[in-house]
Amino acid sequence: MSDPEQLGADGLPVRDSGVWAGEKLYYLERYLDIVSVGMKKKWAGKLYYVDLFAGPGKCLIRETREEIDGSPLIALKFNFAKYFFVESDEKCYRALAARVKVRAPEKDVDIIPGDCNDVIEKIKLPPGSLALAFIDPTGVSPLAFETIRKLAENRKVDLIINFHEGMGIRMNLRQYTRSEANALDRFMGTSMWKERYGKSLKSFNQVCSEIAKEYLGNLRALGYIAVDSDWIPVKTHKNTLLCYLVFASKHPRGNDLWRKIKQIDPHGQRGLFS
């Protein structure tokens, strides 16, 4: 969610972000680029883009005060048949609508107000289409696994998920050690993690890693190819793990393209994740 006191150069709200936000968006843009080129013949007129936590369309990097495009405006650089942007915050929704009107008035964009978990049925993808869904919640709490299940059911939808191993999983596990109340069941889609790890946190780091792997297993149960070697770690400027970018596709071609784009990191280093 944006800080209502933070305004961009156009006078509209921006999302207050750390430098790591640029890294996530770097990989998103690279994937959209390679997909729009590599899939344009096979999926001509049938490529769709979905953003479940779209935000206001602009980010302000707090460390540098640089203003950058957010995920929706990045996606508009590429040719998709239609775009679905979901945003629950009214100020962000209005800011995004205004920016889309300026940036790409000619494109077919459906900006859906509301919590993505409540309005997921409003995303209408036609049969025979291929969609890419960028899912970037602020933590584990805003996203229910059931929402991913509904989005992916009987559809070809590639997923890029910001998996909050640092901010989300660790925070909720610490909460779990104090009380039974937590958001992980809803986020994970099952309570299996609790049965396996909840009562025996012998190695905190190992537990977090195993929960992340269990999440991939839950994605595989939906028909996805999802492997931990495809994770991209996103870290703070102090080199602390913040989250993983998790990619999942129902076709090996999608995973192949993801592995190609992650061979060069945002700093120009080649082969860091290969």
Image (cartoon, grey):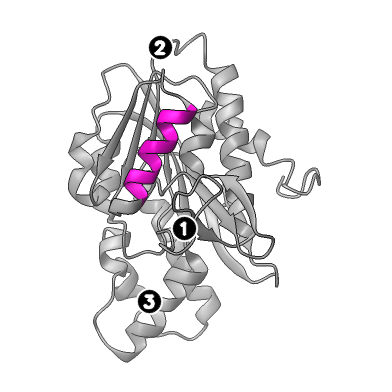
Check disc 1: other Cα within 10 Å, few if <14, some if 14-19, many if 20+: many
Identify the element where label 2 is drawn: loop
Check disc 2: other Cα within 10 Å, few if <14, some if 14-19, many if 20+: some
Alpha-carbon distance for marks 3 and 2?
A: 42 Å
Q: Which mark is residue 163?
A: 1
Amino acid type at image mark 1: Phe
Identify the element where label 1 is drawn: strand
Tag 2 residue = 45
Quarter of image, res 20: bottom right
The region drawn magenta spans: 92-103
Alpha-carbon distance for marks 3 and 1?
A: 13 Å
Residue at 44% in and 37% down: 99
Residue 172 location, x and y as percent? 37, 76
- Considering the image in quadrants, where does the C terminus appear? top right
46 to 93, vertically: above or below = above
Tag 3 residue = 172
Of mark 3 and mark 1, the one earlier in the sequence is 1
Amino acid type at image mark 3: Asn
Alpha-carbon distance for marks 2 and 1?
A: 30 Å
- Considering the image in quadrants, where does the N terminus appear? bottom left
Q: Nearer the viewer, mark 2 or mark 1?
A: 2
Residue at 60% in and 46% down: 68
215 vs 261, left or right, is: left
Of mark 2 and mark 1, the one earlier in the sequence is 2
The answer to whether residue 229 is magenta is no
Identify the element where label 3 is drawn: helix
Quarter of image, res 64: bottom right
Residue at 58% in and 18% down: 38
108 vs 230, left or right, is: left
